[in-house]
Image: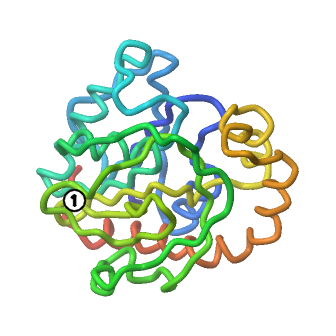
Amino acid sequence: MVRILVIQHEDGADARRFGDWLVEAGAELEVLRPDRGDAVPADLDGYDGLVVLGGSSGPEDDETHPWLPATRALQRLASETQAPSFNICLGAQLAAVAHETRVFRRSRPQVGIMEVRRRAEAAEDPVFSVVPERAKAVLWHQEEIAAVPQGAVHLMDGTDAPVQAFRVGACSWATQFHPEPDEEIVRLWAEQTSLTTQAGRQAQEVVEEYLAQADEIEASFRPVAAAFVEYIRQQPSRR
């Protein structure tokens, strides 16, 4: 069984569908809640992989979210030691900052379902090669990654926030978009976060947009979860 540590930053931002797909592919998830007092470990001993989820904070809001420095340190260690990791939205922004890349506040948040594109560099990637050349994805962020980290591989672009997915080193993946939300999460975000209004969207409009494309989103990104687990399975055990 592949054992994956999941760092969840807050209620309403759990692994949801992506977590279900990981489990279906043969993973066992251990969810860590630093917002509830769980300590972020200094290493990944005992785990085969790492997933860092999204959240409403910025990647350098260390005063209000004091576990973020330890999370960034763990992400750096993962890339340095070739421990497979998958970092989503805030997780991707944290990974960018961990690798000395600027993240800035957009003038207008990205909220809703948008098209992302697989770049040519992804053709040989062990995880993102399974994504269609064009895919619909959930975007929900006001911070933007300025560029891929130095030496990283730019895997997906699209929209006016072109850093949609990248890989640092051999196996530290990151996505600005969200592969994980289901209808419940999209509705929660649409109705309870200020980003919806800031983006000029209506909550029900966003929910309906998601429902119309939920199957397509699943078809595009369920294979990513399976590929991530399969990649981990092929590596020497870290336990």
Q: Which three-letter amino acid code belongs to the residue tagged 1?
A: Val
Query: Dot 1 surroundings within 10 Å: few (below 14), some, or many (20 or more)?
Result: many
Q: How is the image coloured?
A: rainbow
Placement of 185 over or under 147, stated as above or below: above
Placement of 165 over or under 140, stated as above or below: below
Residue shown at 18% from the left, 66% from the top: 170
Residue 226 % position (x, y):
48, 72
Placement of 235 over or under 57, stated as above or below: below
| Left or right position of 114 against 7 | right
Q: Is residue 88 visible?
A: yes
149 or 52: which is nearer to us? 149
Residue 45 % position (x, y):
22, 41
| Left or right position of 71 against 193 | left
Residue 94 % position (x, y):
33, 40
Residue shown at 27% from the left, 85% from the top: 124
Residue shown at 31% from the left, 65% from the top: 232
Q: Which residue is mark 1?
A: 168
Label 1 secondary element: strand
Q: Is residue 6 visible?
A: no
| Left or right position of 51 against 210 | left
Locate the N terminus and report the quarter of the image it occupies: bottom left
Residue shown at 49% from the left, 37% from the top: 31
Say which quarter of the image contains residue 187.
top right
**Count of all numbered marks drawn on residues in the image:** 1
Residue 38 % position (x, y):
43, 21
66 or 139: which is nearer to us? 139
Say which quarter of the image contains residue 163.
bottom left
30 or 152: which is nearer to us? 152
Placement of 79 over or under 44, stated as above or below: below
**Looking at the image, which residue sits at the far front?**
107
